[in-house]
Image (cartoon, rainbow, N blue to C red):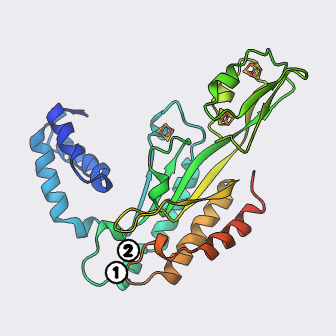
Amino acid sequence: MKWTEEAEEAVKKVPFFVRKRVRERVEKEASEAGKSIVTIAEVKATQQRYLSGMASEIKGYQLDTCFGPGGCPNRAYGGDDLLKRIEMLLKEEDLLGFLEKNVKGDLKFHHEFRITFSDCPNACSQPQIKDIGIIGAVLPAITDEKCSLCEACVGSCTEGAVSIDKEKEVPVINFDLCLKCGKCIKACPTETIVSGKNGFRILLGGKLGRHPRLARELGCILNDDAAFEIVKACINLYKNKSTGGKRFAEIFDEADFNEFEARFCKNALL
Ligand code: SF4
Ligand code: SF4
Ligand code: SF4
């Protein structure tokens, strides 16, 4: 749906953690009213209704994605199936019921458990400040196809993770530097570098607010099933340890991180 410039500017002023929802709601309400263009009047009316009825909008969790599923060309690996499984899990876990029992007073958006997907390391959906951040990853693999020594792969990698072994005439990937974005794969004209395994980087325990902290990343890449299991384990831990509306980042300590890393990284893809 088209937005006027004034309407776009107005929605940018809405707090970022509700902006996406407000935007979706504005479009839904405008479309129900038979409008094809969103103007400032639609934004103001929806914003007012939305913010005054915040408590009824709270569902106990927030699950969102970057624009990868909409066709972003940078997408390394999309977690569409995993996203659906996690959404079902979040509903089954009844986080809203959990919060209602644990939080005194009105529930607010900041109480909700947050999970986000980014489909490449550009991390547009801010996985570093969510309870669980999931970043799609593709592992480049070297095949027997003859390398033309064009060095397109070297030029495509902003991490300096690709080099060419001139003697053996093969590309070499330094996985300590590689962010698993897949750009070298797309750049290679000879299929000497191709997609290997796909999986997810996992970041745990990020938040903003009065005591912000960045999520810590597990030192491994997990497949879909292992990523699902770690989300399950995080929700269990949160429900066991969180009281009074404490965020996951506040209850997830060093020992938990180490235990999760030992448990989930032992059978990781990388
Ligand atoms: S995180 Fe990557 S795939 Fe997702 S919208 Fe940003 S650039 Fe595109
Ligand atoms: S996947 Fe991305 S970060 Fe890794 S080597 Fe290729 S271009 Fe570099
Ligand atoms: S691996 Fe592919 S992109 Fe890299 S130098 Fe060889 S042919 Fe070129």
Q: Nearer the viewer, residue 189 or 82?
A: 189
In the image, residue 166 above or below residue 21: above
Ligand 3 located in image quadrant: top right
Quarter of the image holding residue 174?
top right
Instruction: Find residue 183 and name its label.
Output: none
Write down the residue under mark 1. 100
Question: For mark 1, does the 10 Å Cα neighbourhood hold few (<14), some (14 to 19), or many (20 or more) residues?
Answer: some
Q: Is residue 116 visible?
A: no
Q: Which amino acid lies under the numbered mark 1 shown in the image of this protein?
A: Glu
In the image, residue 95 above or below residue 103: above
- Residue 168 in percent (x, y) is at 90, 23
Q: In the image, what residue occupies the spot 64% across and 42% down? A: 179
CA–CA distance in space, label 2 to label 1: 6 Å
Q: In the image, what residue occupies the spot 34% across and 80% down? A: 100
Q: Give the structural element (helix, strand or loop) at label 1.
A: helix
Q: In the image, what residue occupies the spot 24% across and 44% down? A: 12
Q: Is residue 124 visible?
A: yes
> From this viewpoint, which residue is outermost toward the right?
168
Q: Is 17 placed left or right of 263 in the picture?
A: left
Write down the residue under mark 2. 96
Q: Nearer the viewer, residue 133 or 22?
A: 133
Q: Is 233 placed left or right of 39 in the picture?
A: right
- Residue 72 in percent (x, y) is at 48, 33
Q: Determine contact: label 2, label 1, CB under 8 Å.
A: yes
Q: Is 254 placed left or right of 96 in the picture?
A: right
